[in-house]
Image: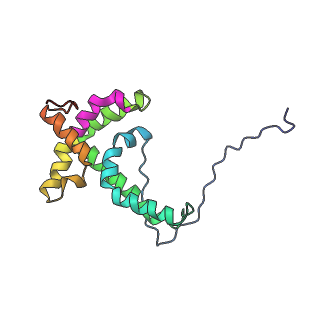
């Protein structure tokens, strides 16, 4: 039996030291894991370059680059926030349905495929085509397998993996 009684400290420690001016200011994303998981494909596609820069910085610092890589980390956060903002503007209803489904199904994506299809279709119709009309390559907005998947769902043609000889 332990000789010492447990003590719980309920105070929160906050570091009030201001960051240097060289570190860009950024608002936190302010969301739970379900909306982030719902938008993860889109965040990953749009923010790939920022994520790669951040991971390269962390690798070069041998995992100890918390302060050295803060600029890159803030860029990743800003990019993710912009993706969520765009999805909320264009596909709020589908986005909410999908992340609520994830929230209620222990974040198991296979249980929310119909909501995911609707979200992917909405994002493709409202965001990817906008990027394409501005002269951007559609692959910049979504990964190619996801684009092919959305196109198959949107046209009613789904690849079943079988081949006819």
Is 146 drawn above or below residue 61 in the view shown?
Answer: above
Is 144 drawn above or below residue 64 in the view shown?
Answer: above
Is 87 drawn above or below residue 66 in the view shown?
Answer: above
Where residue 16 appears, as percent x and y from the top left, is 59, 62
Where residue 4 appears, as percent x and y from the top left, is 84, 39
Q: Main secondary structure of the magenta part?
A: helix
Quadrant assignment for the N terminus: top right
Residue 131 picture quarter = bottom left
Is 6 drawn above or below residue 73 in the view shown?
Answer: above
Where residue 31 appears, as percent x and y from the top left, is 42, 44
Count of numbered marks: 0
| Residue in front for this viewpoint, 89 or 163 | 163
Instruction: Determine whether, in the image, residue 101 is placed left or right of residue 11.
Output: left
Question: In the current view of this chain or complex, which residue is farthest to the front?
Answer: 165
Residue drawn at x 19%, y 49% is 128
Instruction: Determine whether, in the image, residue 131 is placed left or right of residue 99.
Output: left
The region drawn magenta spans 109-122
Residue drawn at x 39%, y 41% is 37
Residue drawn at x 32%, y 33% is 98
Magenta stretch encompasses residue 149? no
Question: In the current view of this chain or complex, which residue is farthest to the right?
Answer: 3
Instruction: Determine whether, in the image, residue 79 is placed left or right of residue 114.
Output: right
Where residue 150 appears, as percent x and y from the top left, is 20, 39
Instruction: Determine whether, in the image, residue 17 is placed left or right of residue 89.
Output: right
Quadrant assignment for the C terminus: top left
Residue drawn at x 17%, y 36% is 152
Magenta stretch encompasses residue 115? yes
């Amino acid at each position: 039996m332990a000789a010492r009684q447990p003590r719980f400290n309920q105070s929160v420690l906050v570091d009030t030291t201001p960051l240097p001016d060289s570190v860009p200011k950024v608002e936190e994303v302010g969301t739970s894991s379900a909306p982030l998981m719902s938008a993860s494909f889109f965040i990953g596609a749009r923010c790939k370059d920022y994520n790669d820069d951040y991971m390269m910085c962390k690798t070069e610092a041998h995992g100890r680059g918390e302060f050295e890589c803060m600029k890159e980390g803030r860029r990743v956060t800003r990019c993710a926030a912009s993706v969520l903002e765009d999805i909320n503007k264009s596909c709020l209803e589908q986005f909410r349905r999908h992340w609520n489904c994830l929230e209620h199904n222990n974040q198991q994506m296979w249980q929310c495929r119909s909501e995911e299809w609707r979200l992917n279709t909405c994002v493709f119709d409202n965001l990817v085509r906008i990027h394409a009309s501005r002269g951007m390559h559609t692959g910049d907005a979504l990964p190619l397998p996801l684009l092919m998947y959305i196109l198959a769902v949107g046209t009613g043609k789904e690849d079943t993996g079988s081949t006819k000889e």
